[in-house]
Image (cartoon, grey):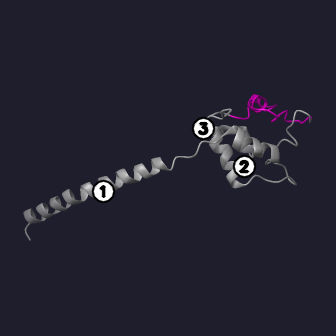
Amino acid sequence: MDRDSLKLGLSLMLLAVTPVVTFMSFDLRQEKAQKKDPEVSYTKDIVPIIQKHCISCHSSDEERPSELYMDTYEMLMKGGRHGKCISPGNAKESILYQKIQPDPPFGRWMPPPKKLKLTPEQVDLFRLWIDQGATNN
């Protein structure tokens, strides 16, 4: 097979493969768009977790060193002694999200020992809610 025939064969093969690769790429982008995270509701998803795992220590009825009270959305968003605990749109920068992870940047992992820890799914709900803007929905 001469060089020109080889070039022609490779060019034809490339022309045949390009539409398939383009279609596959489009299909993967479309599939990723369909797997969008569900919207997390403060009232339906976050409040039950706070009530089960947090409010016994972070209630305005209890005086705590952190001064973080979670009785209401407004109290939660106000934060505590360490400042605002939620950075809407950025879970990784939010103190609350950091504290419910093992090895937080300061203090203890929350909830404290002898308290029921959050499940990975519950932690992920907090992450999604904060990343989605931490709205009072």
Instruction: Give the SS element for disc 2.
Output: loop
**Local crowd size for mark 2, using a 10 Å CA cut-off: few (<14), some (14–19), many (≥20):** some
Residue at the bottom extreme of this rendering: 1
* Residue located beneath label 1 in the image: 21
Tell me: residue 43, above or below residue 110. above
Residue 100 position in % (x across, y down): 74, 47
* Residue located beneath label 2 in the image: 101
Q: Main secondary structure of the magenta part?
A: loop
* Residue located beneath label 3 in the image: 132
Identify which amino acid the numbered label 3 is placed on. Answer: Gln
**Local crowd size for mark 3, using a 10 Å CA cut-off: few (<14), some (14–19), many (≥20):** some
Q: CA distance from mark 3 to mark 2?
A: 19 Å
The numbered mark, 3 or 2, whose residue comes first in the sequence reads 2
Quarter of the figure with the C terminus: top right
The magenta-colored residue range is 63-86
Instruction: Give the SS element for disc 1.
Output: helix
Is the residue under label 3 in contact with that under label 1 (CB below 8 Å)?
no
